Amino acid sequence: MPKINWQAIANTATNVDIVTYVISRIGNLTKVAELCHVAPSTVHYWRLKGKVPAEHVVTLASASGVPRNVIRPDLFE
């Protein structure tokens, strides 16, 4: 399996694209919601806004394999 160039993705993808990709890596909105102990509608809102709340970034990074600085570059450099 080829190595993913996360920096290139972070530089070219929109925040909505990245959140959508994180959700797809974990499975679906419901699985992400269960993992974060929130409603699926909350995860849907994150996807629409293109922003995962800070308190969930580490959990989602661990579950998806997407680095936390790609999920929220404004928090992790």
Image (cartoon, rainbow, N blue to C red):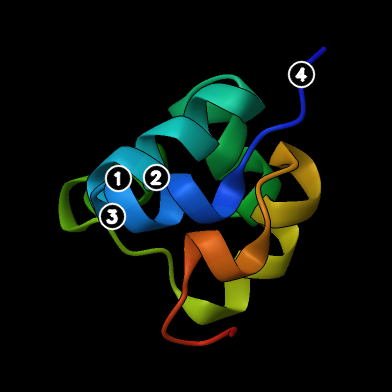
Give coordinates of residue 15: x percent, y percent.
28, 55
Numbered disc 1: secondary structure = loop
- Describe residue 8's horizontal placement relative to residue 27 as left or right: left
The answer to whether mark 2 and mark 4 are in CB contact below 8 A is no
Amino acid type, mark 3: Asn
In the picture, residue 74 is in which quadrant? bottom left
Q: Is residue 50 left or right of residue 34?
A: left
* Picture residue at 17% right of the left edge, 47% below the top: 48
Name which residue lies at 30% across and 45% down: 13
Q: Are marks 1 and 3 in contact (CB under 8 Å)?
A: yes
Q: Which residue is mark 3?
A: 15
Disc nearer the start of the sequence (4/1): 4
Q: Secondary structure at mark 3?
A: helix
Q: Residues within 10 Å of mark 4 (few under 14, many from 20)?
A: few
Under mark 2, the amino acid is Ile
Q: In the rendered structure, which amino acid carries the disc numbered 1?
A: Ala
What residue does disc 2 label? 18
Closer to viewer: mark 3 or mark 4:
4
Q: Quadrant of the C terminus?
A: bottom right
**Any mark on residue 2, and which?**
4
C-alpha span from label 1 to label 3: 7 Å
Marks 4 and 1, how far apart at CA: 19 Å
Distance, label 3 to label 2, CA atoms, is 5 Å
Query: Left or right: 32 with respect to 12?
Result: right
Circles 2 and 1: CB atoms closer than 8 Å: yes
- Residue drawn 64% across and 65% down? 68
> Residue 60, how many percent across, how many down?
66, 52
| Residue type (three-letter) at the residue carrying disc 4 | Pro
Q: Nearer the viewer, residue 68 or 38?
A: 68
Q: Quadrant of the N terminus?
A: top right
